[in-house]
Amino acid sequence: MDANRKASLIGGLLWLTTFVASIPAFFIFYAPVLNEANYVLGAGEDARVATGVVLEVVLIIANVGTALALLPVLRRQNYALAHGYVAARIMECVFIAAGILAVLAVLGLRSQVADGSMPSDNAVSAAASSLVAVHDASFLLGPGLLVGVGNGLLLGYLMYRSGLVPRWMATLALIAGPLVIASGILVLYSVIEPGSGVQALMTAPEFVWELSLGLYLTFKGYQTVPILTAGSTRTAEPVYAAV
C-alpha cells in the first residue's frame, strides 16, 4: 500500500468514525438532557449522557484527523484553501467542545441537586435550561453552519479542482455547502425551527456527501490525478511554509 492509498484509507475511516460517534451521541445518549425540561431535578441518566460526551470527544479527534489526513494532498492543489479547510474544521470542533462543556455543567448541577448541596428549585432548572440552550447554539454555529463552509464549500472546491474523487461527489458538496449555511441562517433568524423537516431536507445533501466521501476514500482511495505525483503542485507553497 503506497503512501497516498494509506492516507486516503486513514482519512476515509476517520470520516466514517465521525458518523459512528456523532449520530448516537446526539440522538441517543444526549436525549435525556436535551429533551427533558426537568432533567436536572430528576433521577437522571448521567452514565448515558456521559457516554455521549465521550463519543463527542471521539468526534472532535476524528474531525481534526480528517482534515490532517487530507491536508498533504489538498495543499498541492491550493495551499491557502487547504489550510483554510483545516481551520474551519478546527473551529467546528471548538463549538462542539463548547457544547460538551455545557452538557457537563448540567451533569454537575444535577449531581449537586442529588447530594443536597444545591436546592431543588426552579432557579436550578432555569440554569440547566440555559446551559442546554448554550449547547444548542454551539451546535447551530458548528455542525449546523461552519460545516457548510469547511466540508461543503472549501473541501468540495478542492476535490472538484483536484479530481481526487468523482466529479459528481464534489459537485454534490458544492451544492450541499450553501444549503447547510442557508439552513443555519434560517434557524438563526427563526424562519425555520431547528431540527424541522425543512432543515433536515436542506442538510441531507451534506450528509450524503460526507458519507459517500468516507466510503469512497476507505474502499477506493484517491482517483489517479497529477497532484498525486511526487513533487507535483498546482499552487506553490509560500517560502515561510518550511519555517
Image (cartoon, rainbow, N blue to C red):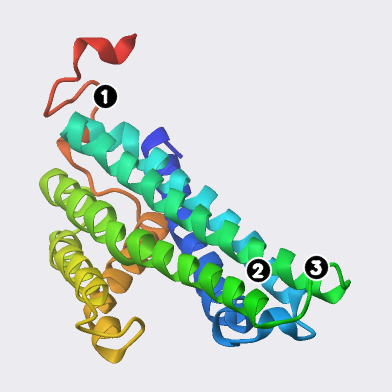
x, y percent for residue 64 = 45, 45
Work out how far the residue at label 2 is from the one at label 1, CA to CA, in angstroms.
Answer: 51 Å
Asked if the residues shown at circle 3 and circle 2 are in contact, with their CB atoms under 8 angstroms apart, the answer is no
- Say which label, 1 or 3, has the lower sequence index: 3
Q: Nearer the viewer, residue 38 or 61?
A: 38
- Residue topped by disc 1: 230
User: Above or below — where is 218 with respect to 88?
Assistant: below
Work out how far the residue at label 3 is from the one at label 2, CA to CA, in angstroms.
Answer: 10 Å
- Say which label, 2 or 1, has the lower sequence index: 2
Disc number at residue 106? 2
Label 3's element?
Answer: helix
The answer to whether any part of residue 170 appears in the image is yes
User: Above or below — where is 174 with respect to 114?
Assistant: above
Residue at x-position 36% and y-position 68%: 211
Q: Nearer the viewer, residue 46 or 200?
A: 46
- How many neighbours does mark 2 have within 10 angstroms: few (below 14), some (14-19), or many (20 or more)? many
Asked if the residues shown at circle 2 and circle 1 are in contact, with their CB atoms under 8 angstroms apart, the answer is no
- How many neighbours does mark 1 have within 10 angstroms: few (below 14), some (14-19), or many (20 or more)? few
Please identify, in this view, whether the residue under mark 3 or under mark 2 is nearer the observer. 3
- Residue topped by disc 3: 112
Residue at x-position 42% and y-position 62%: 138
- Say which amino acid is labelled 1: Ala
- How many neighbours does mark 3 have within 10 angstroms: few (below 14), some (14-19), or many (20 or more)? some
Q: Nearer the viewer, residue 39 or 223?
A: 39
Q: Residue furthest bottom?
A: 197
Residue at x-position 65% and y-position 62%: 105
x, y percent for residue 20 = 54, 68
Label 2's element?
Answer: helix
Looking at the rendering, in which quadrant would you find the C terminus? top left
Q: Quadrant of residue 121?
A: bottom right
Q: Quadrant of residue 71?
A: top left
